[in-house]
Image (cartoon, grey):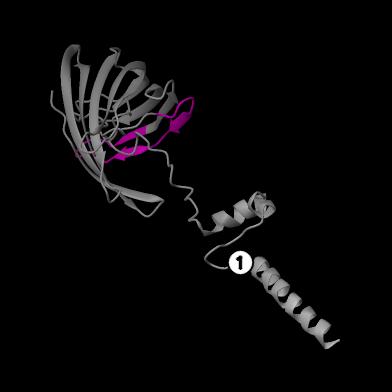
């Protein structure tokens, strides 16, 4: 009996050790059952350690937040609707109110967007705070109150994307046709813009606009250079400093 007991112990111990080694994975050779790795629960648990994406990561880059347009176009088959209100306290003449400064942008292709908008403006000075307001670009204050309504239509094309020192660039061609007020001439505006996204998420963009205009029946041209530095504050806010000029 002792011999059988000894043999039984000798046979039992190695089997128990092998079973224990197979059931407990070691750090050097981890084993994960196949039904666990292929299950949805396993894929969810595997992604728990990853940093969640911010809902503001793919934010809309509008044209209306500055005189200098954005260096992007609307995504393919996507609408971007922009609207705003501008108040200008003119010196020595009545103030200017501009609204709704409506701009609809639709992505025709990956690099081309369709643009349509409308604006109503009342005041004694030209509205130059936005390149999309539809007001005359000369920005000369007049002592009398005037009302202008203009329809905007045109195209915006993405020319290049940023690659190292190569900037992102765009071209805009659009017209402004009066739908009310004293002005009757259609205004043509062409703009070229370029800019870089900096490593600290700042953006430095510049643009040059050319426009045809008229005043008291006399037609002339106007050039408008501009540059802007956009600085994000967290995920929801952004401030910018901008320079632009109007030369006729």
Q: Nearer the viewer, residue 128 or 15?
A: 15
Left or right position of 80 against 248? right
Q: Residue furthest front?
A: 3
Q: Is residue 54 above or below residue 223?
A: below
Q: Nearer the viewer, residue 21 or 3?
A: 3
Q: Which residues are magenta?
A: 74-98
Which SS type dominates the magenta stretch?
loop
Q: Residues within 10 Å of mark 1 (few under 14, many from 20)?
A: few
Looking at the rendered structure, the secondary structure element under dot 1 is loop
Q: Quadrant of the N terminus?
A: bottom right
Residue 228 position, x and y percent, is 23, 40
User: Which residue lies under the disc numbered 1?
Assistant: 25
Left or right position of 69 against 77? left
Figure quadrant of residue 187: top left
* 117 falls in the magenta region: no
Q: Nearer the viewer, residue 119 or 46?
A: 46
Residue 199 position, x and y percent, is 27, 48
Q: Is residue 52 above or below residue 220?
A: below
Residue appearing at x 19%, y 15% in the figure: 216
């Amino acid at each position: 009996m002792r011999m059988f007991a000894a043999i039984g112990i000798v046979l039992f111990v190695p089997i128990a050790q092998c079973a224990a080694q197979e059931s407990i994975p070691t750090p050097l050779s981890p084993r994960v059952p196949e039904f666990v790795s292929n299950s949805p629960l396993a894929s969810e648990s595997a992604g728990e350690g990853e940093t969640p994406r911010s809902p503001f990561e793919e934010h809309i880059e509008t044209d209306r937040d500055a005189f200098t347009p954005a260096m992007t176009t609307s995504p393919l088959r996507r609408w971007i609707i922009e609207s705003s209100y501008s108040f200008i306290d003119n010196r020595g003449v009545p103030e200017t109110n501009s609204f709704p400064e409506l701009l609809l942008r639709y992505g025709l292709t990956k690099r081309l967007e369709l643009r349509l908008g409308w604006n109503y403006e009342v005041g004694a000075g030209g509205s130059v705070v936005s390149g999309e307001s539809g007001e005359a670009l000369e920005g000369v204050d007049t002592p009398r109150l005037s009302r202008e309504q203009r329809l905007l239509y045109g195209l915006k094309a993405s020319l290049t994307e940023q690659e190292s020192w190569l900037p992102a660039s765009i071209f805009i061609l659009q017209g402004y046709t009066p739908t009310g007020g004293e002005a009757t001439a259609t205004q043509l505006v062409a703009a070229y813009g370029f800019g870089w996204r900096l490593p600290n998420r700042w953006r430095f963009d510049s643009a040059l606009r050319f426009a045809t205009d008229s005043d008291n029946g006399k037609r002339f041209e106007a050039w408008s250079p501009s540059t802007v530095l956009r600085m994000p504050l967290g995920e929801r806010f952004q401030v910018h400093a901008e320079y632009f000029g109007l030369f006729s």
